[in-house]
Structures are given as structure tokens and as C-alpha cells.
Image: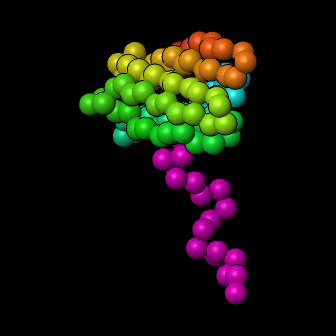
Amino acid sequence: MPTGLPHIQEGQLSDSVFAETCYSWSFGPLSVSVCVDLSVPDISVTVTLLGVTIGKVVLNPQNTSATIGGSVAGFKAEVTFTADFTAETLTISAEVCAPFVGCKDAGTTIHF
């Protein structure tokens, strides 16, 4: 039976919700979701290809780069992430290969 949550005051919000910022970037059938939490600090990354998750990684000052790759239904993708916590940037470099079309590359830099 619902209680109405009387112990939670209206407008009560933890300060921690402001420590995390999320971004998304897409290139054709490839999508990248990035959440940066500067209070830790770390960067959580999820890569999907045609809507299927092909990998996840967490970057931090001790582990500043990673590569995720995979294939789905004849499509292939590889994405490399490089974080610079001092400059507060994440560089994303991707290559996507599609049947009959071939391969293309793209990239971006996120400033957090």
C-alpha cells in the first residue's frame, strides 16, 4: 500500500545529482552515451550499434583511454575514447562499416 512518502520533503534533492552530466553522440547506426561525474571523478561510457549495446567502460584518472568494438547484423564499429581530466575533455574517435556502403570515420571532443 502506498505511503505517500511523507519523510521526503517537497523540493528535497541531493547535491550529488548536480555532480553528474550526461551527453550523447551519434554517427549513423552508432550511438555513444557518456556520463561524467566530477565528484569521483569518472566517465561512464556505453556504446550501441543499431540499438544493441556492444560495450561499456568507465574511465578515470588512472585509466584514461579505452577502445570498444563489435558487430551487429553485418555492421561493424570501433570507438576509441581518450579522457583528459586536467583539461576536462573526452575525445571520441569512431569507425563504422556498413554492408554495401563501406567504412567511414568520425569523431568529436566533449568538454565537461
Q: Residue 12: percent from the left, percent from the top?
A: 59, 58
Quadrant in the picture for residue 10 = bottom right
Quadrant in the picture for residue 48 = top right
- Using the rendered image of the protein, determine whether residue 23 is visible from the camera's viewpoint: no
Q: Residue at x 36, y 40 (%)?
A: 40
- 43 displayed left or right of 94: left
On screen, residue 79 above or below 15: above
- 89 displayed left or right of 51: left
Q: Quadrant of the N terminus?
A: bottom right
Q: Residue 80: percent from the left, percent from the top?
A: 46, 22
The one nearer the camera, 84 or 93, is 93
- Using the rendered image of the protein, determine whether residue 26 is visible from the camera's viewpoint: yes
Q: Residue 45: percent from the left, percent from the top?
A: 50, 36
Q: Which residues are magenta?
A: 1-20
Q: Residue at x 56, y 26 (%)?
A: 77
On screen, residue 26 above or below 46: above
Residue 80 sits inside the magenta stretch: no
